[in-house]
Image (cartoon, rainbow, N blue to C red):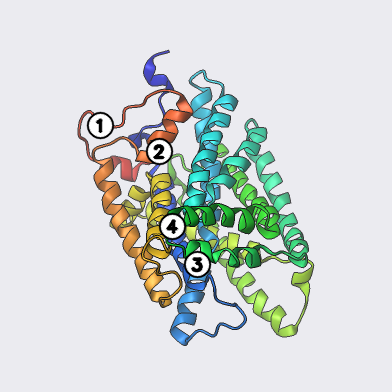
Amino acid sequence: MNNLSSQPIQLNQRTMIIDILRGWALLGVVLMNYYDFFVLDKDPVLFKPDSLTDGLMYFSKTVFAAKSWTMLSLLFGYGFAVLMNNISTKGKNPYTFFMRRMFWLLVLALINSALFFGDILKDYAILGMLLLFFYRSSAKTTFVVSLVLLLIIPALSAFINSLHDTGREDITKLFYLYRSNYLVDVLYFGLKGTYVAQMISKPYLYTVHVVMFCCFLWGFSLYKINFFNAFPTKIKLVKKMFWISLAVTLVLSAYFPIIDKLKWNVKDYYNIRYWLILSTMLFISSAICWLYISERCKTFFGSLAIMGKMTLTNYMAQNLIGLLIFSGFGLGIWTSMPIGFYLILAIIIYRLQVFFSKWWLSRYNYGPIEWIWRQLSYGKKLPLKKLAGKPLFSSTEYQQP
């Protein structure tokens, strides 16, 4: 076996639509993470926003809230299947390799949790290990299991919501740490906040993790049916997904105001809120796929793909930048600005990251955090700097991912 056989997937071997979807999800992540600082210490009952603020809040929650991490979860499941296949065909033990890879992701999650109390890497690292039980499963098996989970989620959500949870109250008591001028206090807030708001908070600990794993299995199933192979030929299937997910989204969007007006307490027993989130996520994903196959929005998609090739680096960088802007150790802006400030700031940061990612990938094979993670995963030194210049995207790569 030559030395190249054990190398990770190179940039020019990646499927561009996957990077585009990752890039879109990252846009949603930075928008909602920075949006959180606007609402963080506001009482949802007492807070009365003006019309503009209310409109921006509604748009942000409808288009991006929970849509990004569910989309990234689906892509994580797909990436798991790609990686396991890549490793097994090269004579390595995929189970040992993936366990080691998830361990180092958990280490990175510890660092990221200190930067921002809304870390999601720890969830991928831990739940990712459960995917090993499905490594040799068929698309049918994983999809059926995902449908069972999908049916369980509303009942689980309703039950968990009926229990007393102190996550929000506990994290509110820690806000003084984030406002501190000392970096140690701010980092401790991130770690402690991650613990109380996610690791022991019942809605996140139980419901969110089941939703994540359901999305993992969807992504795994997509790989098993070769969904993204010869992708331009899948236009009919993509259109079908688009119209079905749109119809479901519209029906579910009408369902909630109707039951509220009729004062039905269905949500107390079977809360289908996550069905609306998942159908919206699938609608957005299929819309992006349809536009991509139709060769629309090439410049925009090129920017998304640049971001998607450095997902881990850009995600952690967004959180570090947020710490420097919002915490007491940094500029101390916290929740003092109007909502437009947080959303515009997120877009500016994202745009700057696009420029940086393009510059970086024109010179190096991987993003800096991706490079470190891959070396730890593979247990060997991998070349970072490109030996010979080549365009980041060729026209062939764009049209035939």
Instruction: Give the residue drawn at x 37%, y 45%.
Output: 310
In primary-sequence order, the first of circles 3 and 4 is: 3
Given the image, on which type of amino acid does mark 2 rest? Answer: Glu
Mark 1 Cα shell of 10 Å, populated few (<14), some (14-19), many (≥20): few
> Circle 3 is placed at which residue position?
36
Please state which of residues 70 and 292 is positioned toward the viewer in this rendering.
Answer: 70
> Circle 2 is placed at which residue position?
370
> Marks 3 and 4, Cα distance to the nearest angstrom?
22 Å
Element under disc 1: loop
Please state which of residues 146 and 28 is positioned toward the viewer in this rendering.
Answer: 28
> Circle 4 is placed at which residue position?
182
Question: In this rendering, would 73 be left or right of 14?
Answer: right
Mark 2 Cα shell of 10 Å, populated few (<14), some (14-19), many (≥20): some
Q: Where is 153 relative to 384, above or below?
A: below
In primary-sequence order, the first of circles 3 and 1 is: 3
Instruction: Give the residue drawn at x 31%, y 40%.
Output: 397
In primary-sequence order, the first of circles 2 and 1 is: 2
> Circle 1 is placed at which residue position?
386
Residue 205: x percent and y percent? 67, 53
